[in-house]
Amino acid sequence: MLQQAIPLGGYTTWKVGGPAEYLAEPDSLTALLEILAAHKQTGGPLQIIGAGSNLLISDQGLPGLVICTRRLQGAQLDGSSGLVEALAGEPLPTLARRAAKAGLSGLEWSVGIPGTVGGAVVMNAGAQGGCLAERLIDATVVDPHGGEAFVLSNQEMDYSYRHSRLQTEKLVVLSARFQLTPGQNPSLLSAQTSANLQSRTSSQPYHLPSCGSVFRNPEPQKAGRLIEALNLKGYRIGAAEVSEIHANFIVNNGGAKAADIQALISHVQTVVHKSHGFWLHPEVIRLGVFSESLQAAA
């Protein structure tokens, strides 16, 4: 069940990252809970990852155990009530399309996000004017260091822009429930969902590995516009590049290292700070050891 010394580049959308000392990919909640129980007995570092978007893993890799939840897929949709329950590894685009076909509105914005339900719950994922906090009823979570699974309501998540309590309180998301709006026209919803995806793919560099948006928007300003106005499009460190298509994306042009991406994020932050007097706050979660720090100030 456990694999050793597995490179993690294949588990992130940036396609970078050193090896996991041990890697597990449970395909059921029972298997996941058994792995967590066994790990509690042995101890050591533990990291949970999903689709690997919004994630930068060190070139040195990660010690201890890495659990990837992307095989924990499955969802139940009730067309009459609008209630949706999905496992943590369910891909957001898949869930958005299924909801549209069932005449359930509320997730059309998520079709272009290359993440899982679990990651979206943690990050309060959002796009095109929508966000997960608007539709989440609750999530079932478990403490990876022991204890029974329990439910956190939407209100208990402490949601704000791209933030939840789960970013600091290391609980593992098992599943989530959403309240969507039933009784909508499936054809119209599917058309809107497809249009949302087309809008994203035509304005963002989907042809190259990236993590999605790198920086949170310093509202009311947009991070991409600030970066573009400073002529940083196309700026490269190693094989990491500020996208020519959308300046809030850093792409891997082939062979980039996590250190290249880290250095480029820091460079963009510094240039923006010198020009505008504030630091862009990364959406990216970093795992592992890096030689230089990022400015975390919003």
Image: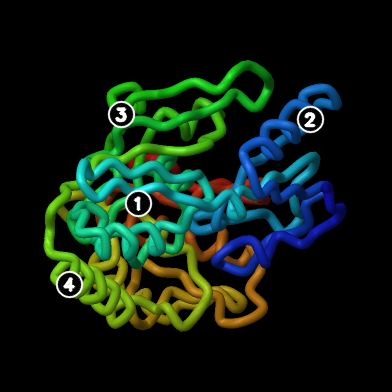
What type is the residue that disc 3 sits on?
Asn
Type of colouring = rainbow
Marks 1/2: CA–CA distance? 37 Å
Residue lying at the far front of the rendered structure: 80
Marks 2/3: CA–CA distance? 29 Å
What type is the residue that disc 4 sits on?
Ser
Q: Quadrant of residue 133?
A: top left
For the C terminus, the quadrant is: top left
The x, y position of residue 35, in whole percent, is 75, 35
Task: Please tell me the numbered disc located at residue 280.
Answer: 1
Dot 3 surroundings within 10 Å: few (below 14), some, or many (20 or more)? Answer: many
What type is the residue that disc 1 sits on?
Leu
Task: Please tell me the numbered disc located at residue 53.
Answer: none
Residue corresponding to mark 2: 39
- Whether residue 99 is situated above or below residue 145 in the rendered picture: below
Task: Please tell me the numbered disc located at residue 187.
Answer: 4
Q: Closer to the observer: label 3 or label 4?
A: 4
Image position of 78 (left or right of 185): right
Marks 3/1: CA–CA distance? 27 Å
The x, y position of residue 273, in whole percent, is 34, 53
Image position of 2 (left or right of 227): right
Dot 4 surroundings within 10 Å: few (below 14), some, or many (20 or more)? Answer: few
Residue corresponding to mark 3: 154
- Whether residue 283 is situated above or below residue 133 in the rendered picture: below
What type is the residue that disc 2 sits on?
His
- Asked which secondary structure carries label 4, the reply is helix
- Asked if the residues shown at circle 3 and circle 1 are in contact, with their CB atoms under 8 angstroms apart, the answer is no
Q: Residue at x 42, y 51 (%)?
A: 282
- Asked which secondary structure carries label 1, the reply is loop
Lower position in the chain sequence, tag 4 or tag 1: 4
Q: Quadrant of residue 134?
A: top left
Do we see residue 293 in this rendering? yes
